[in-house]
Amino acid sequence: MTEKVILTVAPTGAWPSKQDNPAIPLQPEEIAEDVYACWKAGASVAHIHVRDDNGLSSMNFEKFERTVEIIRSTDCGIVLNLTTSGQLGLKDEDRWRHLVALKPEMASYDCGTMNWLNTSVFENSPSFLEGLGNVMNEYNIKPEIEVFDTSFIYNALYYLKKGVLKAPLHFQFVLGAAGGIDATVENLVYLKSLIPTGSTWGAFGIGKGHMPVLYATIALGGHVRVGMEDNIYYLKGRLAKSNVEFVERVKRLVNEMGKETATPDEAREILKLKNIPKNKNN
Ligand code: ZN
């Protein structure tokens, strides 16, 4: 059987603005419309952030609710993966309130703490990680373990042993974040070597490592993520016209390498998702 590659699109993120790239979707209606177009173009999973009315980083519940509601009201069958790290400095429970209410199939699980270089602390304390893991277990939400550096994997192994995380684990290697591990193929190969057998994994590079990490991830049998959360440039010096443009490129590359992008249902199977929405109609 042809190997399937799960294609996640991360259209918004917490940081880029319309000044950085006018095509970035920030409000629920535009995010939902963008996700729909990316699904049509071949994306399997959408990793969702929301912004406040001014376009700034936010974990505003109503914004999540509205975004998810619009996506679910269409025939868009994409897997929803909601962030738990859309805004710094929140109380633990304000980072998972939307998960309890909206029950997405997946959510991010940032398995460690890091400095965003000279700006702030990306804090994911032991109490947060334990609480979030328990909530995700209770509601059958699959954690996407985001790995910004090597130690995040060792933290995940600790929570696996403790029963807060359950096998099979799914990792997302984030290479090239300011303060995290650099976006090189060598680092990708090293991170991949550390995860337990039977885990699934994806990766992406931010900035100049975007394309090398993308090619290497497909070659090494990983899943891929693209979108303006991670890169506002399509190529050096040329802004992306849309998130769809990134999705279309990955689809071409995957096909050229003799593989296929996974449909949302194939992604559900590969990731062993349990919380499949009842109104899913694709
Ligand atoms: Zn994110």
Image: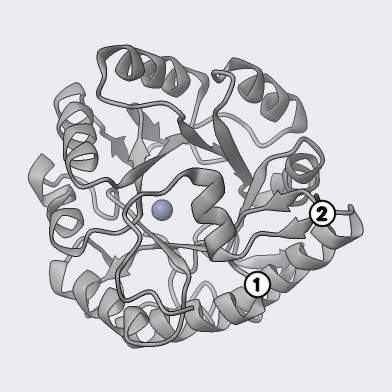
List the residue tagged with mark 2.
259
Q: Quadrant of residue 133?
A: top left
* Image position, residue 130 (x, y; %): 19, 27
Q: Amino acid at mark 2?
A: Lys
Q: Nearer the viewer, residue 190 or 121?
A: 190
* Image position, residue 197 (x, y; %): 59, 19
The reply, left or right, for residue 88 in relation to residue 251 is: left
Disc 1 residue crowd, few under 14, some 14–19, many 20+, Cα 10 Å: many
Is the C-beta of the residue carrying label 2 under 8 Å from the nearest atom of ligand 1? no
Q: Nearer the viewer, residue 270 or 173?
A: 270
Q: Nearer the viewer, residue 71 or 49?
A: 71
Residue at 56% of width from left, 46% of height from top? 270
- Tag 1 secondary structure: loop
The reply, left or right, for residue 64 in relation to residue 13 is: left
Q: Which mark is residue 192?
A: none
Q: Amino acid at mark 1?
A: Gly
Q: Quadrant of residue 241?
A: bottom right
List the residue tagged with mark 1.
42
- Tag 2 secondary structure: loop
The numbered mark, 1 or 2, whose residue comes first in the sequence reads 1
